[in-house]
Image (cartoon, grey):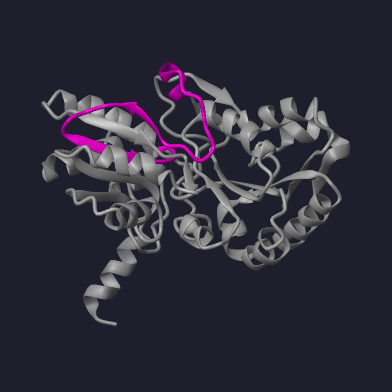
Amino acid sequence: MNAQELSRRQSKYTARKAPKGERLATSAMIASLDSEGRDTVAAPFGHALVDIAQTRDDIVGLTADLSKYTDLHVFAKAYPDRFYQMGMAEAVMISAAAGLAREGFTPFATTYAVFASRRAYDFIIMAIAEENLPVKIVCALPGLTTGYGPSHQATEDLAIMRGMPNLTIIDPCDATEIDQATRAIADHPGPVYMRLLRGQVPDVLGEYGYQFKLGKAQMLRDGKDVLFVSSGFMTMRVLDAAGKLRADGIDCGVLHVPTIKPLDTATIIAEAGKGGRLVVTAENHSVTGGLGEAVAATLMRAGVHVPFRQIGLPDAFLDSGALPTLHDQYGISVDAVTTSVKGWM
């Protein structure tokens, strides 16, 4: 190892000190994102599931020792006889969920996204997806929503899951959409993988009169210069970025794509095909194998040739640290998005 590489590795693990007079956040994991100045909703997934269960005896909840950190503790308190604590055994949880589904139940299995996509992948394929069972796998800490490093950062979960037949994949934006999507997937007859923001979750889409529709992308705002195609909490970010860019005379539209699979190709092609706009995908996921590549392939197959850029996480193992710092570092903060788009225009 040369001196330059040694220095790089040492600096990666050196504690970052705050500038004099400033205070850095000390927690590597935070409950939600972009909540400052916005209304928030506590545990929207847990409360939605409780509401559904009031009229449906088939709803059951399972977790791999993470009920508090997936908001399933709300359901567990309301329906202890329908809650299953499986311990730190994701494969066992998935297998049990498959068995419950075979007996007529609709199981919601929760864990962290890294554990479902990496540890339990084969069990999801063989026990759930191949049989097309109605198991809903709802996973916290998607993408870069924790500063705990590669062991907890599910930066490649969409790429892993997109190749699985029969699986519907949802990446909701906020509390409004989590509530609505939870109800929608409960009615969906097949398996679902849904990313989850938990804790105090911002409410962003409520002001747009938004209504989640499974498999559908929706325009939140139009614009003549740039078309953002976004999913997850990056829709929050690009909406904020669009406001900042307007002050610089750049008019941005935002197409929110909560269903990653099946992708709403018709809407994406129609909006991108209007012409004259830079198309920018934005996702809380690696630029490899996620929404950006799915949109690019869709446009290429349809013969829609437009200027195209991706905003996403690098194809790399990411650092640990405070999330605001990491989001700036990896280009997914509002300021970073704004700077990128200005550079491309």
Q: Is residue 155 magenta?
A: no
Q: Nearer the viewer, residue 260 or 46?
A: 260
Above or below for 34 versus 285:
above
- 185 sits to left or right of 296: right
Which residue is rendered at x = 82% and y = 46% of the image?
84
Q: Nearer the viewer, residue 323 or 115?
A: 115
Viewed as shown, does residue 281 lie left or right of 340? right
- Residue 324 visible, this orientation: no
**Dividing the image into 4 quarters, which one contains the C terminus?**
top left
Q: Residue at x 38, y 35 (%)?
A: 235
Q: Is residue 40 above or below residue 276?
A: above
Query: Residue 121 location, x and y as percent?
Result: 62, 64
- Position above or below: 297 against 333: below
Residue 20: % across, % down = 26, 37
Q: Nearer the viewer, residue 247 or 73?
A: 247
Where does the image place residue 332, in percent across and percent down from the top left? 32, 44
- Quadrant of the rendering where the N terminus is positioned: bottom left
Report the residue at 50% width, 37% height from top: 172
- In the image, residue 21 lies at what x, y percent? 28, 32
Left or right of residue 325, residue 264 in this image: right
Is residue 305 at all visible to an observer of this figure? Answer: yes
| Rendered image quadrant of residue 88 | bottom right
Q: Quadrant of residue 272?
A: top left
Residue 229 sits inside the magenta stretch: yes
Residue projecting furthest to the right: 81
The span picked out in magenta is 204-233
Q: Which residue is at a point 14% across and 30% down the rendered structure image?
A: 250
- Residue 18 falls left or right of residue 143: left
Looking at this rendering, what residue extends furthest in the bottom direction? 1
Q: Is residue 77 above or below residue 123?
A: above
